[in-house]
Each structure stands twice: as C-alpha cells, then as structure tokens.
Image (cartoon, grey):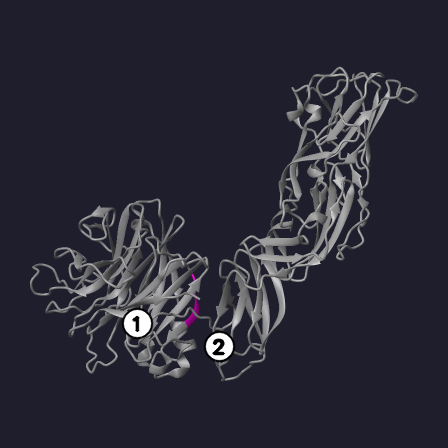
Amino acid sequence: MKKTVLASFALLALLAGANSCSMEEPQAGSDSRIEFVIPEFEDDYVDTKVTTVVSGSSISSTWDAGDRIGVFPDMGGDQVSFTVSSGAGTGTCSFNGHGWALVSAAKYSAYYPFSKENYGDANAYKNVKLSYLGQSQTSKGTFSVGDFDFLACTKAEPSFDDPTAPGGKCTFNFKHLGGLVILDVTFPQAAFVSTLELECEEPLFPQAGFVDLSQDDPAFTATAMGNSLSLDLGGMSVSAGETIRFYMMSAPANLLSASSNPTVKATTSTGYEMAKQLSGKKNLKAGKSWSISTTLVASSTPVATLKATPAAFYPDFSANDITFRVKATEQYTITPGVDWLTFVSSTSIDANTTEYTYRTTINNTSTSRVGNISIDGATKHANVRVEQDGLILSVPMTGEGHTIYTTTGNYKYRYGPSIIMNDDGTIDAWFSSPGDLTNVPNRGMADVFTWRRTSNGGQTWTAEQIVLTGSAKPAADWWSVCDPGAAHFDGYYYMAYTSTTNTSSDGGLQGLENDCFIARGTSPSGPWEKWNGTGWGSNPQPIIEYTGPSGKWGIGEPSIVVKDNTIYLYYTYNDGDTPLTKVATADRTNPNWPGSLTFHGTAVDKHWLAATHDGLDSTQGLYTMYDSCDVKYVEDYDLFFAFHSSWRITSSSRLSVWTSVDGLTFEYLGSIQNKSLAQIPWGYDVDDPNLIPYIHNVGVSGDGLGHVNLSKTQYLSFGYSPIDATDRAHGQWSTYWCVLNYE
C-alpha cells in the first residue's frame, strides 16, 4: 500500500513488457530495471480566496511492499503487472525484470491503482476508469486515501547505457491526477460521526471518469459530477472542542465558479448535522494540496432533546458530586438549566456509554430544588442513570382523558387494563370485571376478563364481551381470573392472570395466597388453551406458585414483554407489606416456555420507594399502598419502563415510573401527581393536572410484544374512585383513558 502523509493507503502496482498479453507475474531471468517515482504534493495557495487556509504540512508519498502498477506498451499488447520488490518505504520503487525484457523501440505508459478491468481490450489504455466515491477514514491515526490517489505516466522510454542494468532501464515519473484536501476540523460537541463532506450547491466535484494513457500529458476526464466530496468515518467518536485532521482526494475541481462558498459538514450516526460555510472558494488542481481549518457549528434546532424535569434533591441527599451515565447511540453534551449544577468531568466507558460528573451546591439541605437538564443532538433520547439517590426525572402525562366505564355501585368495575395496539390502528383492551357469583354452576366467577376494541384511540368502543373465565371446579383457577397480562406473538395471544383456591369456609373469596396462571389462543376473544404444567390444554396449573407465609396476598398481576428471543414475565410478589415486582425470563423459541422460566428476583423494589422517597416505615398503613407494575419496552429510548400507582385509591395517589437498561433491575425515575388535589405536596415529582386522584392498577399501551413506538400516540388507563364520591366502597371504581406522553 502506497503511503502518504504519516499514513498508509492501498496501492496496487503493475508493470508491463512489450510482448506481454499475460496476467501472470514475470518470471526470473531478465536483468532489466524498472523504476516508479511518486512526486510530492505541493501546497497551493495561488488564486485562493479562502481565509481559513493554514500552513500545510510537508506531504510525501511512499510505496509499500506488495503494491502493484499497471503498464501498457505502445507497440500493442495487453497490460501486465509487477509487484513492488524493492524500494518499499521510499518514493521510488524498482523491479528487476525476471524474464521480461525492455524493447528499445517501445515506449511505455503506467498507471495506479492497477485494475483487472483493463485486460482484454486493445484500447483499454485510452479509457482507464477512475472513481472518487467510497473514500473513508475510520481512525484518527490512519488516513486511507491511497486507493484514490490516482497516478499516471506516459511515453516513458527505456535506456540501455546503465551498466547496472544490462537489460535496460525505464523510469516512470508519475503525476497525481487529483489534488489532496486536508481538513482540520474542530467539533462543537461530542458525537459519533458517520460522514464528513465538503459540498457546494452546484455539482462541481467530479465523481467518476477516466484517464487516456495515449496522451503526452495524461489528465482526468470526468464522466459524472456531484455536489460533494464525502468521507465515510464509520461512527468515529469525537469530543467537544476536539480538532481532527482528515484527508480526501479530489479530481481537479474549479470551485471558483460556485454561486456560494463551499461548506464543511459532519453528520452523526443518528442524522444530526454540524456544519460551517467557508469564507472563500478554491480552484483545486492536480498534484496540489488544499489545507482548510474550520470549526463546525451545531444546528440551532437539535433533532431531539431529552429534558429531565425536574431535578429534585431530597433531605437524605448528602453528596456534592452527581454522576450521570449516558447510554445511547452517540455521545452527548449535557447542559444544566440551573446555576447550582456545574460540569466536573466526563469519562468514556465504551463506544456507546459516557459517564458525566456534575457538582451541585446543594449539600445536606432539606430544600428541594427544581430545574432542567437537556441532552441535545440525537434522534433517540439518552438513558440517564443517576448513581446516587435524589435526582428525579419525569415522564409527564399530557392530554385530557375521559371515562370509558362508569361505576354504578359496589363491585361494579373494569380495572387492571391490558392494552395491545395493532398494526392496523385498532386497539384491544382486556379488563378485570365482576363475574356472576350466583348463576354459573361450579364456578366462583368472582372475576372474569372482558374485552373491547377501539378504532379511534379510545373515543368509542365495540360491545363488551366476556372472553376468559375460570375453569370448572375443582380446577386450580375455578374461583376467578383476575389482572390480565396480554401479549401477542408467534401466532398466539397469551393471557397471564391471577387466581386463587384460597376461599373462606362458606365459599367466599379471601383473595389471598394467589398464584400466576396463563392461557393462549389465536384470537383476542378466545377460545383459550390453559397451561397444564407440561403443555397447553385443560386442567390449568400455575406457572408461578406462591409458597410463602400463609394468609398473605401471594403472586400475580402479571405483565409480559418480549425482546429479541427473550420473554420477560413480571409479576407482583407480596408476602406481608409493600409488594415487590419480580421478573422471570424464558426462551421465546420454546412453545412450552411457561414450563422453563428462569427467575431473576426483584425487578422493582417498592420497599425502597416507600422508605426512601416517601419517608414511610412498615408501621404506617400507607406502606402497603404501592400497586402492581405494567412494564413496556420503549424502542426509541432502548429502555424498559415500569408504571404503577402509588398510595392507591387515595387523594394522594400518583403514577410512579421506573426504567431499566436490561429489563431485570429497575431504577426509580419519578412520580406524576395532580398537585392541586394532593394532600401531601412534598411527595410529588411532576405536577400534572390531567392525572386524577384515587387511581389504581394502571395499564399502558404497547404492541403485542409489549413494545412502545413513540411515533404513535400512546395511552394510559386505570381504575379510579370518582373524585366526588361520598362512598368509596371497595370495588366501586370507574375506568379512565387518556394519552400518555413520554418526554
């Protein structure tokens, strides 16, 4: 590979003898000597009006061992090739003929880089094809422009008066067919950069063409033009304020005829642009180098912005430094919107993760502070993880909602919704609904699942249908099916649910020592096959069985997410006080996956939320008022989100939100509450007047895999006790439906 400017780039070199029509390497035997000489690029500041030009570095080109050059004789015959055998590392390489003899009556033309396409055509030497497309630089220390530094030499005559080369000597003094552009680019912010371009409004840059080696002074002739020179950087990581040198080759291009000055533009791997228009133009000539120094400017309107609002520090916060770990498809600059948060340092963890440390002036204070933190420059929001307690981010809910079911008395409800958004724009929703305790023999029917569909975002719905009930007594789920957890993948609807055999002596429902069950069907309304312990059919058996202390709530309230080939099954575990959300996983490719769950323990620790965030202890009644989680995977964030109500069915109820990178361990993000209706004003993190109080058992929209695509409107639904109710008897709940906006 020929080398230029402190860096290597590929050159393939060939040499031809007068009598050759073969692609074979020359054989041993000749004492001819052939030399190829590369000229240096010359700095060219003549006729330039560009004030950003800086002094160019000394440019030199050298050969590498293995480089090949193509040679044509003028007496007819095909090209031949020789591999450089000596002179590697210098600007002159040589090759001893080894069986090839120079002919005194012949003249020779040579070009670089060699191409096999020039075989088989008697006139190929008049049309050696060249292209400047596909240039790349993937390292800050290696510059690979050699494949595009096209060289040519014509009418070289051999001589036979050198005693060191009895078989004759021929020297090819190459000329560069294009010019070298050197760009010293300073970046305004950290990013992963995919391309760098020098562009004009008009198509002034030759993209492809040819050279005619029959000419006395060979030159590039363009056959295709474009608006820019482009360099593929392969997602190169750059830091804010960092200056990097780039190299590009260009065919001669007279940019003085452009209607405006050229622009240097960098595009990140997520489509964000940084650019700067130069202050002048240039006539870029062959064999010359053009040095440009410029500082790019970030777009005034970022592609996307993540705003963490608010950042609140609570009384137990005692550290000066806060660490943010940002994981996304490119690096970011974090800009605090408050005067009490200042940048300290940043550390690159890996190609996708940078850790930023900020210092706060808040220390051992009991006063909360609220402000904005923006992370700019990406099409995807970053995952901001706070390594110390206290910083609360928000996912505020927006848009007025409406009631889709109105209670008419005790044990009249539709709660715990599970919501699937379909590709055709319709939405399916399943609810826990009261069953018929008196008119269905051999079934408890304390709860059944009803199903409805909407085609206009929840404004109107189809008629309600009962679609899943408990099996006939004495089946393990005979008393009820409760808390739907729906999914749809690989041809089946899956419906996980809670049920219990723990009833009182008179047959009444205790609702304790619950287990988790699952059924599947090919339609959202059934019929259903229930998991029987080894397969699908009748005789339902739990997929997760409660084995904790007797008289406790147990296991249930499931939620399903599928990511790649892993099924994540989330479920409530409550053996005494504040319920936990635990997680188990299974292999999606196994049709009997419920029988091979792997258990990972606690995913959402609501003990921590009660004690640390809300300042409660286990002696307080509200310690138990933290509800079940509905979990979704948000594709735009590459994050799992868990939603649940806190302080359920009280005037201080709120929507609590957690996030996770791996789906196994979640970190608290924040809570949303209607401040004007709350009785504990210090407990909320985000004030949203659209969130009514007295809520419980929330359901969040997603597709059949439990994925959220933020290009589509998303929804939140929950049961609630009417605000103006005078009797808040258990089971007297309406159902609310509203837009959920992730910000």
Whether residue 290 is visible here, answered yes or no, is yes
Horizontal side, residue 742 vs residue 100: left or right:
left
Question: Which percent across, then down, holds residue 538?
Answer: 18, 49
Q: Main secondary structure of the magenta part?
A: strand
Where 447 falls versus 530 (above or below)?
A: below
Residue drawn 42% across the image and 76% down it: 685
**Amino acid at the residue labelled 1:** Gly
Circle 2 SS class: loop
Along the viewing direction, whichever of 108 and 718 lies nearer the viewer:
108
- Provide the residue designation for mark 2: 312
Q: Magenta residues, as a range?
A: 665-670
Residue appearing at x 27%, y 51% in the figure = 493
Where 520 sits versus 130, above or below? below
Is 477 left or right of 93, judged from the image as shown? Answer: left
In the picture, residue 651 is in which quadrant?
A: bottom left
Cα distance between the residues tagged 2 and 1? 31 Å
Residue type of the residue flagged with mark 2: Ala
**How many numbered marks have been drawn onto this rendered protein structure?**
2
| Residue ID at (49%, 70%) | 308
